[in-house]
């Protein structure tokens, strides 16, 4: 077999090009089996509580599912939804309040539904974070995401978020957050009058 000679400049160009591909994740996309495009390194683990993320029965929490029922478990960071006739059951990962002081538990209901909500900080949020803006219109910068279910408790909502890192964590100022696609689905099923229980 005859060995072909590859000029040094070509070999250097190849090595430089290959190393730049490996160092540039925006250019090098993972392709299984391709040594020049290896699988990305796993990110540092994020503390998320999914140990209790399992299906629940509505009966320990509600006397009926009239108007539908939403159970938010702040320990497992999960939201459960049952339709009025119990033909639909959904389980969604959620964000929960940062601290115990910000966490409200008990029974309430959905009193209003808003697609494309605007946002204003509560007086206590503004006191803690005076640099925050007084108002954010609907859109990609809005902390309430694409949809919001307003609860009977003032300032409390179940809403979406554009920051997907918050889901599964203690990350809110009191509200319950869902992925935007999950709140859109829940929004389509829940109605004004749907029962809500936070435990």
Image (cartoon, rainbow, N blue to C red):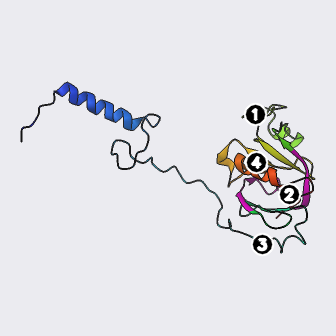
- Of marks 2 and 4, the one in the foreground: 4
Q: Is residue 29 left or right of residue 116?
A: left
**Are the two marked residues, 2 and 4, in contact with CB atoms closer than 8 angstroms?**
no
Tally of numbered discs: 4
Front one among 111 and 101? 111
Q: Which residue is mark 4?
A: 184
Residue at image x 79%, y 37%? Answer: 129
Residue beneath disc 1: 139
Residue at label 2?
104
Q: Position of residue 103 (x, y in %)?
A: 82, 56
Disc 4 secondary structure class: helix
Observer-nearest residue: 160 or 45? 160
Q: Please give the range of residues in magenta.
A: 90-113
Residue that numbered label 3 is attached to: 57
Marks 4 and 1, how far apart in space? 15 Å
Q: Which x, y percent locates residue 74?
A: 76, 61
Q: Is residue 181 above or below residue 72?
A: above
């Amino acid at each position: 077999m005859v060995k072909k000679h590859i000029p040094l400049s070509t070999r250097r160009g190849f090595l430089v090009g290959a190393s730049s591909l490996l160092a540039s994740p925006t250019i090098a996309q993972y392709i299984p089996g391709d040594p020049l495009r290896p699988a990305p390194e796993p990110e540092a683990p994020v503390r998320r509580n999914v140990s209790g993320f399992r299906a629940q029965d509505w009966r320990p929490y509600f006397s009926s599912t009239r108007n539908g029922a939403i159970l938010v478990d702040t320990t497992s960071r999960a939201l459960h939804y049952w339709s009025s006739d119990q033909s639909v059951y959904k389980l969604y990962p959620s964000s929960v309040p940062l601290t115990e002081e910000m966490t409200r538990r008990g029974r309430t209901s959905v009193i209003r539904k808003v697609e494309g909500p605007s946002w204003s900080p509560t007086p206590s949020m503004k006191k803690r974070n005076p640099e925050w803006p007084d108002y954010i219109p609907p859109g990609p910068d809005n902390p309430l995401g694409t949809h919001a279910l307003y609860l009977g408790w003032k300032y409390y909502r179940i809403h979406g978020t554009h920051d997907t890192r918050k889901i599964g964590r203690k990350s809110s100022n009191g509200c319950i957050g869902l992925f935007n696609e999950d709140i859109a689905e829940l929004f389509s099923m829940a109605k004004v009058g749907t029962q809500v229980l936070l435990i």
